[in-house]
Image (cartoon, rainbow, N blue to C red):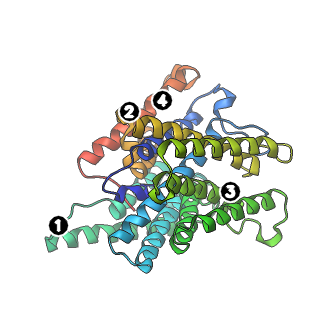
Amino acid sequence: MTSALTEKPKRIASIDVYRALTMFFMIFVNDLWSVSNVPHWLEHAAANEDMLGFSDIVFPSFLFILGMSIPLAIEIRKKKGDSNSGILKHIIIRSIALLVMGLFTVNLESGVAASIGISKPIFTLIMLLAFFLIWNVYPKTENKTRQNLYSGLKIIGIVILAILAFMFRDAEGGVFQTRWWGILGLIGWTYLLCAILYLFLNKNKGYLIVALFAFILLCIGGSNHWLGIFDGIIPGNGCFHAFTMSGMLISLLFNESELGIGIKKKMLTSTFIGIIFILGGFAAHNFWIISKIQATPTWLFLCTGISILLYVLMYWLADIENKASWFGIIKPAGTATLTCYLIPYFLYAIFVLTPFSLPESLTTSPIGLVKCIIFSFLTIGITALLGKIHIKLKI
């Protein structure tokens, strides 16, 4: 999940800050499973529950900021002289990487059968080793021996993943399969289609708005069971893609100078759009429940509006008031996001392999919630330390 923006020489502070905050809270909510008596408003709502939990807002926020990064990265590649075919190849390779990692992580959720000879924690650690062998940012060098070494390490990583996929059996004996693709896989599918649309629509805002509305209509069709055999043809029936397309359009609004409007007007316009989406969510609530799991239009509208308003706030703080330093402690979560996302898998696996267990006070709310916050900071701190020794994933 290292953003496309990481290729930009001069980073836009608000995007990094927004992404860092989103990743911080993603780690936090993903750790809530380890705590009992968690306030319900912090959790994911159940599939048929009409509620927007705090946890239900985090994933849409990430898809939104993913969309904001896409135009910036593609335009940078164009300025470097990359052809559309070259950029398309890059998009496909990145998407495949996300899909592969998503498939491995989602299969792990179903457990690992004892019959394969290794435990789930060991399987996880070997999987993570392979991820880092393949997608680590190796130092640039003209030394042929080192180049061959790095290529060899990547090949070893690929072979390891192939073996793991072949030998995998879940707790019920099921083989390695797509399941629901996992968070990384959903991001991969969303990025693939949205980035290709941006590339070939040549940042035409009118066409991109049409694409956004098409995804919204697809989401509505899915929620009303109108799609028939086309139901689920893309993950979320367009809902996830609508989050990303919204971020893409807001990015163009803020970063396209030819629009001829000042920063204040851009912020006011974005605020107005965010409010319209939220009002649309309240209106949609008359027809559909608020449900992340069902990917309802109500959830789509409310979370899009919230994401836009939060970005306007981050833009004002980080880029207008130059307060990005306030978020310096979590900065690695915004610049080494994929590494940061995977660190908890490592920590959970290591913890299971040790003889230690946390006292009940640390696994019960409210103290347990403080533990989750500390865990988020620990994860980001480890990400920062790994970066200092040149261990960082980039796809």
Q: Is residue 48 above or below residue 40?
A: below
Cα separation, mark 3 vs mark 2, equals: 33 Å
Task: Give the residue at mark 1.
Answer: 141
Q: Can residue 170 be seen?
A: no
Kindly identify the amino acid type of the residue bearing the numbered disc 2.
Lys
Q: Give the residue at x 57% y 65%.
A: 194
Q: Give the residue at x 17% y 66%.
A: 141
Cα separation, mark 2 vs mark 4, equals: 22 Å
Q: Is residue 373 or residue 116 the one in the foreground? A: 373
Task: Give the residue at mark 3.
Answer: 239
In the rendered structure, the answer to whether residue 151 lies left or right of residue 174 reads left
Task: Give the residue at mark 4.
Answer: 373
Kindly identify the amino acid type of the residue bearing the numbered disc 1.
Thr
Q: Is residue 341 or residue 60 the one in the foreground? A: 60
Kindly identify the amino acid type of the residue bearing the numbered disc 4.
Ile
Q: Earlier in the sequence, mark 1 or mark 4?
A: 1
